[in-house]
Image (tube, rainbow, N blue to C red):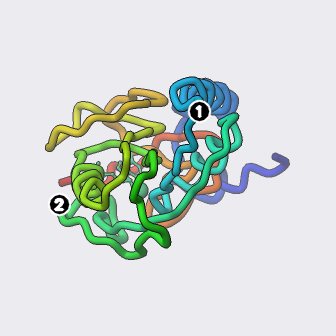
């Protein structure tokens, strides 16, 4: 990329935690693992908007199987980084999950509230199987127990932006994952 539009315009953008090459390599590994595990099957990938959109777009292209995908949007953080603990569906799936091998794609597993809610909600729709892949995991922040079947990276308790992750809806298009300089409000 030519101009680092973010580095001189925004005081909020901090150092790189995971650079784009490291992310790409790990996403390919996850894709290879999923390809092996689902051989003979056709996973139905569900991208959790908006944060997982960038990861999802890369991950689906590293899976060497016939797949299908759908999108769901949930709200919990609003405009800030503070979790209300409440999860609601803002945009539901287009398709039924009955008899599908569902693979839920998330950007980051933090308190676990979002995935805890979504797993229960989607399990009730009759999928054949349901697994979770998350790019990032912050285990130190967990409030409820959630199992992630595939994890890209375990990271420390720092607020990160880029590669789909936002701070007040910005920075999702940064190619690297960076640390936010300003400490956001946390629950
Ligand atoms: P949880 O319900 O607390 O597990 O939160 C999951 C959601 O919170 C993610 O899908 C993100 O949208 C958001 N989130 C949690 N930590 C971060 C972060 O460090 N950067 C950006 N978004 C985050
Ligand atoms: Mg999100």
Q: Residues within 10 Å of mark 1 (few under 14, many from 20)?
A: few
- Percent coordinates x, y for residue 157 in the rendering: 31, 35
Q: Residues within 10 Å of mark 2 (few under 14, many from 20)?
A: some
Left or right: where does residue 130 sit relative to residue 38? left
Q: Is residue 41 above or below residue 29?
A: below
Please state which of residues 102 and 73 is positioned toward the viewer in this rendering.
Answer: 102
Q: Residue at x 65, y 36 (%)?
A: 63
On residue 67, the disc is: none
Total labels drawn: 2
Q: Which residue is mark 1?
A: 40
Q: Which residue is mark 2?
A: 85
Left or right: where does residue 67 sit relative to residue 87? right
Viewer-nearest of discs 1 and 2: 1
Res. 32 image quadrant: top right
Distance from Cα at disc 1 to Cα at disc 2:
38 Å
- Percent coordinates x, y for residue 45 in the rendering: 52, 50
- The answer, for residue 106, to whether it is visible in the render is no
- Percent coordinates x, y for residue 23 in the rendering: 61, 32
Q: Secondary structure at mark 2?
A: loop
Q: Residue at x 80, y 51 (%)?
A: 3
Please state which of residues 148 and 81 is positioned toward the viewer in this rendering.
Answer: 148
* Sequence-first disc among 1 and 2: 1
Please state which of residues 161 and 54 is positioned toward the viewer in this rendering.
Answer: 54
The answer to whether the residue labelled 1 contacts the one labelled 2, judged by CB atoms less than 8 Å apart, is no
Q: Is residue 156 above or below residue 45?
A: above
Image quadrant holding the C terminus, namely bottom left
- Percent coordinates x, y for residue 149 in the rendering: 37, 31
- The answer, for residue 46, to whether it is visible in the render is yes
Q: Secondary structure at mark 1?
A: loop
Ligand 2's image quarter is bottom left
Q: Is residue 179 above or below residue 77?
A: above
């Amino acid at each position: 990329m030519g101009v680092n539009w973010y580095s001189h315009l925004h005081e909020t953008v901090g150092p790189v935690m995971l650079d784009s090459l490291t992310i790409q390599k790990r996403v390919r590994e996850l894709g290879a693992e999923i390809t092996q595990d689902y051989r003979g099957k056709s996973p139905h990938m569900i991208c959790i908007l908006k944060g997982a959109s960038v990861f999802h777009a890369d991950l689906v292209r590293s899976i060497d199987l016939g797949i299908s995908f759908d999108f769901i949007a949930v709200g919990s953080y609003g405009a800030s980084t503070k979790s209300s603990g409440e999860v609601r569906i803002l945009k539901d799936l287009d398709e039924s999950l009955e008899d599908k091998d569902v693979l839920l794609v998330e950007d980051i597993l933090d308190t676990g509230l979002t995935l805890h809610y979504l797993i229960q909600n989607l399990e009730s729709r009759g999928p054949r199987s349901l697994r979770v892949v998350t790019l990032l995991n912050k285990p130190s922040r967990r409030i409820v127990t959630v199992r992630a079947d595939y994890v890209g990276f375990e990271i420390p308790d720092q607020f990160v932006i880029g590669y789909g992750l936002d701070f007040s809806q910005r920075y999702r298009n940064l190619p690297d994952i960076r640390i936010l300089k300003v400490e956001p409000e946390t629950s």
